[in-house]
Structures are given as structure tokens and as C-alpha cells.
Image (cartoon, grey):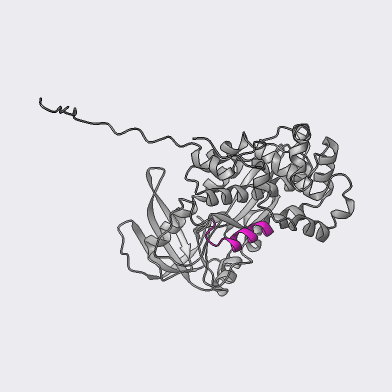
């Protein structure tokens, strides 16, 4: 079976998911349109997304490849190929806040227009009894070169950027992201990540984000949080709660007794000590939360589900172009990271629209080699990576019957 022909290339069908008015609108908002001459803001976005789709090795790789496909590129809303210096200058000078707003606008456009987007193409497992919105918070470190990226230097011979993510557990799509130098501590960024959460939502994060001032603010806002206990946390048990599961060692209502911590969080919260299966081994872990309604085993399941956010970072870093960068400035690095997040959302939407059942990496590799082919995107994915069902085998020999014999 062969894929159907199409009048547009695969790359054009992908880029058409971005609304036509959006890039020019954001360019006017950030003042980018006033400094664009031969290399428009739309051509800049196209070039950066193409760099992720093709795993371009350098600026020359992007500019040369797009120049060779200049005819097909012009059909994509009159996009033009960049020169090497033009693309480098655009990444360095044009504000990365435009790329950030473009990511949020496209995500908002797709999720509002298609409410089921993100809920049908993930294997994320959550306790069924929880009907609230569940948010996952974590960060990933992106290694950079210390000798030429001094703005991101956080150790003597190392430089890195960090992408802090607020992920919706029901859709496995990012709700909020912060990209900055790795020198800042996670707990400093936690307040910014959780600023848009609403009353009744769950937020789950690692103990690196624990800040009792912030946790107390979340509790007063009606937000339910779950995290791990720090080893040096001083507390006293106010009341022991009933244990209903064999894996739960202790379920108690506690109050902080530290000189500073008791002032930062004067209310009581919950401590759960449980034996949790991790990497095939039983590990004793200690969780704290401000929720007293859910069972202790359900709180443990919620935190175990948080570990799957590593799958999101794995898809992002191992599939898209985040191992090396096309520019050394902070603005250029942020452009590339925000365009990676945008590319991820576009590919996830293609998986949803095509009812793709394979992995994210398989989807990326299936499209990477045929970006300039004029094939129907959905028909390509319908036959890609699937084998025809084998013919049914007869376990017993058939008896041949002939008339008069």
C-alpha cells in the first residue's frame, strides 16, 4: 500500500498548523517587523522549526538546505531561505519573547479548537478516582559550552541552561515553562511556575522545589500539593491517622517545629511514609501533602505518576535538536528551546489527528526523511511502521472431496 499524493509537501502541511495571522501579529507586538528586510519573521520561524525537524548540524546546514528547496519553500506563505549570517543575526537580535509567545498562542489555539487533543494519544497512568486537574513540576538541565557561553556558567568549568516545566498530567502537554540559566535554584522558580494554578488543582513536584513559604501560599489558595520530605525537616506528630494499606508504614498529621520553618508554615499538614516499588526494588519514601481526604496509597500513586515527566524530557531532548545549538548568546539558545517546545506540540497534534499509535521518536523519524515529498501526511502515518496481518494458517489438512469418489 502506497501513501496518497498531495499537492503540498509534508513540511508545508506541518507548518500550516500555525495560524497565518499569528506570527505577524506577534512580530508587531515585539517590534520585530520594523527590523526585518529580506528575512521576514515568518521565514525565521520556518527556519528554526526546520532545524529541529532535520536535526541540522550548523547554520550552514539550515541555510544551504532551504536554499536548495527554495521553490517548495516559497509556497509556504512566501518564506525565503536565510543566509548563514542572517539567521545568526536574527537569533541573536530578535527577542526570544516572541518565540515564547508563539509557543503559548499555538498551544492555546490547538487545545481550544480541539478539546480532546492530548487526551487520546498518551499512555500516562493516573488514579481513576481523581477528577481534579493534576499538574507535574520538574526541570531538565541542557548542557552548554562554558568557554563561549559565560552567561550560563554555574560551575567552574560547566555551563548549562534549565527548562522548568509545568506539565498537565491529563494531556501530557506543557502549561507553563521557564527557560533560564541553571545557576538559579529550583525553589526560586516554583512560585513563577505555580502562579497560574486555580483553586482545587493538584501540583506534584520533587523536594528540590520545597519552599515552606510557597507551600503555605498554595494551601491558602486552595491548591493541593504533594512532594517529598526533606531529610532535615524538624516536626512533631500531632495525630496518627488510620492505616488501610499494607505498604503504608505511617500516616500522620504533623506540625513543623523548626525555628524558621514553623513561622513560614504555621499550619499542620500530612506525612506519609510508605514502601514504594521503584526500578524493581522496594524503597521506603516519605511524602508530605496538605490533602487529608485521599487515601495514603493514592497519594503515593500520584507521586509515582510524577516520574513519567522524565518521558516528556526524554522525548524533547533525545528527539529534537537540543544537544547542540546554532548560537552562543542567551537569546539564541532561548529561541532554539522555545522552537523545540513548539515543534513538540505540532508533532503531538499530528499524532492526535492521525490516531498515531507508535512512539514519539518513531513519528519524528517517519516524517524527517520525507519533509519535501508531496505526500498526504495522514496516509503516510497510516501505513508507516505497520505490518500486514499474516495469512491465517490451517492447523489440520483439508480433505479433498470429489464427486463419485
x then y, percent, for residue 288: 47, 62
Q: Is residue 93 magenta?
A: no
Q: Nearer the viewer, residue 89 or 35?
A: 35
Q: Is residue 243 left or right of residue 102?
A: left
Q: Nearer the viewer, residue 399 or 309?
A: 399
Residue occupying the point 59% across, 67% down: 197
Residue occupying the point 65% across, 49% down: 341
Q: Nearer the viewer, residue 312 or 278?
A: 312
What main secondary structure does the magenta stretch of the protein show? helix
Q: Is residue 113 magenta?
A: yes
x then y, percent, for residue 184: 69, 52
Identity of the residue furthest to the top in this view: 405
- Give the quarter of the image for residue 109: bottom right
Magenta residues? 104-117
x then y, percent, for residue 222: 54, 73
- Give the quarter of the image for residue 405: top left
Against 170, is 389 above or below? above
Q: Is residue 372 left or right of residue 239?
A: right
Q: Is residue 405 left or right of residue 101?
A: left
Q: Does the image show residue 322?
A: no
Amino acid at each position: 500500500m502506497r501513501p496518497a499524493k498531495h499537492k503540498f509537501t509534508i513540511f508545508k502541511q506541518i507548518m500550516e498548523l500555525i495560524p497565518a495571522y499569528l506570527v505577524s501579529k506577534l512580530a508587531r507586538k515585539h517590534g520585530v517587523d520594523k527590523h526585518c528586510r529580506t528575512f521576514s519573521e515568518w521565514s525565521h520561524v520556518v527556519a528554526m522549526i526546520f532545524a529541529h525537524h532535520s536535526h541540522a548540524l550548523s547554520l550552514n546546514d539550515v541555510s544551504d538546505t532551504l536554499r536548495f528547496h527554495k521553490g517548495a519553500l516559497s509556497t509556504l506563505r512566501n518564506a525565503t531561505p536565510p543566509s548563514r549570517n542572517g539567521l545568526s543575526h536574527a537569533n541573536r537580535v530578535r527577542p526570544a519573547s516572541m518565540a515564547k509567545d508563539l509557543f503559548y498562542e499555538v498551544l492555546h489555539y490547538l487545545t481550544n479548537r480541539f478539546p480532546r487533543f492530548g487526551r487520546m494519544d498518551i499512555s500516562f497512568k493516573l488514579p481513576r478516582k481523581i477528577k481534579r486537574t493534576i499538574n507535574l513540576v520538574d526541570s531538565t538541565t541542557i548542557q552548554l559550552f562554558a568557554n563561549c557561553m559565560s552567561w550560563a556558567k554555574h560551575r567552574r568549568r560547566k555551563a548549562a541552561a534549565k527548562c522548568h516545566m509545568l506539565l498537565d498530567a491529563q494531556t501530557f502537554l506543557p502549561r507553563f515553562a521557564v527557560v533560564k540559566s541553571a545557576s538559579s535554584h529550583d525553589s526560586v522558580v516554583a512560585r513563577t511556575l505555580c502562579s497560574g494554578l486555580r483553586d482545587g488543582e493538584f501540583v506534584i513536584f520533587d523536594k528540590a522545589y520545597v519552599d515552606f513559604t510557597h507551600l503555605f501560599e498554595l494551601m491558602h489558595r486552595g491548591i493541593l500539593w504533594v512532594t517529598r520530605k526533606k531529610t532535615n525537616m524538624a516536626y512533631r506528630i500531632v495525630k496518627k491517622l488510620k492505616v488501610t494499606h499494607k505498604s503504608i508504614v505511617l500516616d500522620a498529621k504533623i506540625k513543623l517545629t523548626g525555628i524558621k520553618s514553623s513561622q513560614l508554615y504555621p499550619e499542620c499538614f500530612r506525612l506519609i511514609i510508605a514502601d514504594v516499588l521503584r526500578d524493581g526494588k522496594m524503597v521506603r519514601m516519605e511524602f508530605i501533602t496538605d490533602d487529608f481526604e485521599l487515601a495514603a496509597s493514592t497519594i503515593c500513586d500520584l507521586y509515582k505518576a510524577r516520574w513519567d515527566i522524565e518521558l516528556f524530557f526524554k522525548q524533547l531532548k533525545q528527539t529534537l535538536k537540543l544537544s547542540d545549538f546554532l548560537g552562543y548568546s542567551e537569546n539564541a539558545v532561548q529561541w532554539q528551546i522555545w522552537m523545540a517546545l513548539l515543534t513538540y506540540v505540532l508533532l503531538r497534534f499530528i499524532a492526535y489527528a492521525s490516531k498515531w499509535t507508535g512512539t514519539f521518536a518513531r513519528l519524528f523519524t517517519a516524517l524527517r526523511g520525507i519533509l519535501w515529498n508531496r505526500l498526504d501526511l495522514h496516509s503516510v502515518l497510516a501505513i508507516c511502521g505497520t505490518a500486514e496481518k499474516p495469512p491465517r494458517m490451517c492447523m489440520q489438512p483439508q480433505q479433498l472431496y470429489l464427486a463419485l469418489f
